[in-house]
Image (cartoon, grey):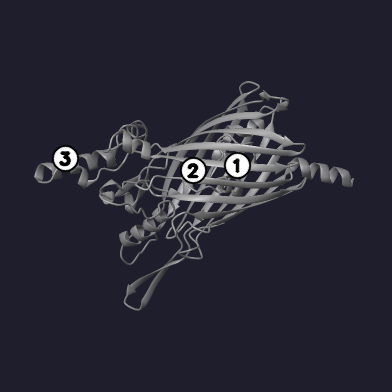
């Protein structure tokens, strides 16, 4: 079943890596970071995706668990639940999707704490194997899922922190009892730690909002594919962001945000980075074994300064998102953004567009992704988010009595 694993892992790689097109010696410079459970890095909600995959320092909402869970402590509503759905890689296949359920609940009398949770399910559709030519074997439905719970708390009037604990399960194969091949899914545990700072400066006669946020996500164990023969790092990620919101007129506001991301995963050694001959081959094998046996915590520190191209390649590993959100009376929203990843590290570059409409009880958001590369499998990606506000429900039923 190793072939099945490799095919599915290739599809997963396509979900986060576009084809790099470079001139000259681009083939030698193309070196994206390899991780397992790559679906953990896919933005689940339409709001963040429409701003170019941005959300470290934006206003809190029901989907802050993915972007920065410490924001929940500053949420205005007592509780909210959000359902997200994304058809994925729809230019290639029509049965891959990401579904996500997220929510939070404020606790404590001082309105300064919150508990949160999310459930993600990433389906890779149906895969049929063949035992012999023309004879269909078993039907395979590979998937990845995660469940997490979080806690956030204000440490001052302007600053909060949050932690999240996550269980991850990746099922990319099946057991073939006739061949004696007993494949099981790969499990992992991870944690996030985050912080959020917000202040309200006065500029001219207007009260604005300036926020900063950071989130280190998926700090945890490795996942072992192919019966433990191929351990992979989780996509541990450092996210830094800032957002500035200012009023345009009565009931009209505009927020502009910027996020920076870096995977805290060591780069896998490449044979082309070592000298030709026996000595170069031996050095490469040694480095590859060290990489495979490296602990996740050691890998976090090794991810800084390990790039064979030096500082130039280190800077290539940083992705950035720039986006904006216009809101009218906190009921109608227009959003746009841009996401950039270096061509040698995956070449994901795309624009996001989106809109939202909110009532007291429910909010509906949608986004559309336009990749700058025509051959990108991420082009024309749609996302839909439905959010229920518990304060709105309470007011609605209260008025009905």
Determine if residue 44 is in view: yes
Residue at 45%, 45% in the rendered image = 340
Which of the 4 quarters of the picture holds residue 64? Answer: top right
Residue at 70%, 24% in the rendered image = 204
Query: Residue 318's x, y, as percent?
Result: 41, 38
Residue 324: mark in rendering: 1
Tell us which disc is closer to us: 3 or 1. Answer: 1
State left or right for residue 390 relative to residue 350: right
Residue 111: mark in rendering: none
Write down the residue under mark 3: 283
Query: Residue 268's x, y, as percent?
Result: 29, 43
> Please, which residue is most extreme toward the left here?
278
State left or right for residue 190 relative to residue 387: left
Query: Residue 2's x, y, as percent?
Result: 31, 59
Is disc 2 placed on a helix, strand or loop?
strand
Residue at 49%, 45% in the rendered image = 339
Q: Is residue 112 above or below residue 182?
A: above
**Label 2, label 3: how far apart the Cα atoms are:** 36 Å
> Please, which residue is most extreme toward the bottom here?
134
Q: Earlier in the sequence, mark 2 or mark 1?
A: 2
Tell us which disc is closer to us: 2 or 1. Answer: 1
Write down the residue under mark 2: 167
Mark 2 and 3 residues: CB-CB less than 8 Å, in contact? Answer: no
Tell us which disc is closer to us: 2 or 3. Answer: 3
**Label 3, label 1: how far apart the Cα atoms are:** 48 Å
User: Is the residue marked by circle 3 packed among few (<14), some (14-19), or many (20+) residues within 10 Å?
Assistant: few
Q: Earlier in the sequence, mark 2 or mark 3?
A: 2
Query: Residue 253's x, y, as percent?
Result: 70, 38
């Amino acid at each position: 079943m190793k072939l099945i694993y490799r095919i599915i892992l290739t599809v997963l790689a396509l979900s986060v890596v576009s084809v790099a097109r470079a001139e000259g010696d681009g083939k030698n410079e193309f070196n994206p970071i390899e991780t397992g459970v790559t679906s953990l890095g896919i933005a689940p909600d339409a709001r963040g995706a429409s701003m170019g995959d941005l959300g470290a320092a934006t206003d809190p909402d029901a989907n802050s668990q993915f972007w920065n869970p410490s924001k929940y402590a500053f949420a205005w509503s007592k509780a909210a639940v959000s359902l997200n759905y994304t058809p994925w890689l729809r230019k290639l296949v029509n049965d891959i999707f990401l579904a996500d359920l997220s929510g939070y609940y404020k606790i404590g009398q001082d309105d300064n704490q919150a508990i949160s949770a999310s459930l993600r399910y990433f389906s890779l559709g149906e895969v049929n194997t063949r035992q012999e030519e023309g004879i269909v074997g078993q039907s395979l439905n590979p998937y990845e899922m995660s469940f997490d719970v979080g806690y956030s708390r204000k440490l001052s009037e302007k600053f909060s922190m949050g932690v999240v604990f996550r269980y991850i399960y990746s099922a990319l194969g099946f057991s073939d009892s006739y061949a004696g091949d007993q494949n099981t899914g790969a499990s992992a545990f991870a944690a996030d730690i985050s912080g959020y700072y917000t202040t309200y400066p006065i500029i001219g006669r207007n009260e604005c909002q300036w926020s900063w946020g950071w989130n280190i996500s998926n700090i945890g164990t490795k996942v072992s594919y192919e019966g433990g023969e191929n351990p992979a790092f989780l996509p541990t990620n450092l996210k830094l962001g800032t957002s500035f919101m200012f009023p345009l007129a009565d009931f009209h506001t505009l927020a502009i945000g910027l996020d920076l991301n870096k995977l805290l995963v060591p780069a896998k050694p490449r044979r082309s980075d070592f000298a030709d001959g026996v000595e170069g081959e031996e050095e490469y094998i040694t480095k590859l074994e060290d990489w495979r046996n490296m602990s996740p915590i050691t890998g976090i520190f090794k991810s800084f300064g390990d790039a064979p191209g030096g500082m130039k390649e280190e800077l290539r590993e940083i992705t950035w998102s720039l986006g904006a959100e216009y809101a009218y009376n906190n009921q109608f929203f227009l959003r746009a953004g841009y996401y950039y990843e270096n061509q040698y590290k995956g070449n994901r570059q795309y624009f996001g567009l989106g809109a939202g409409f909110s009532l007291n009880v429910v909010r509906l958001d949608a986004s559309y992704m336009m990749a700058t590369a025509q051959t990108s499998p991420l082009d024309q990606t749609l996302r839909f988010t439905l959010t229920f506000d518990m304060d709105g429900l309470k007011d609605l039923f209260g008025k009905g009595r």
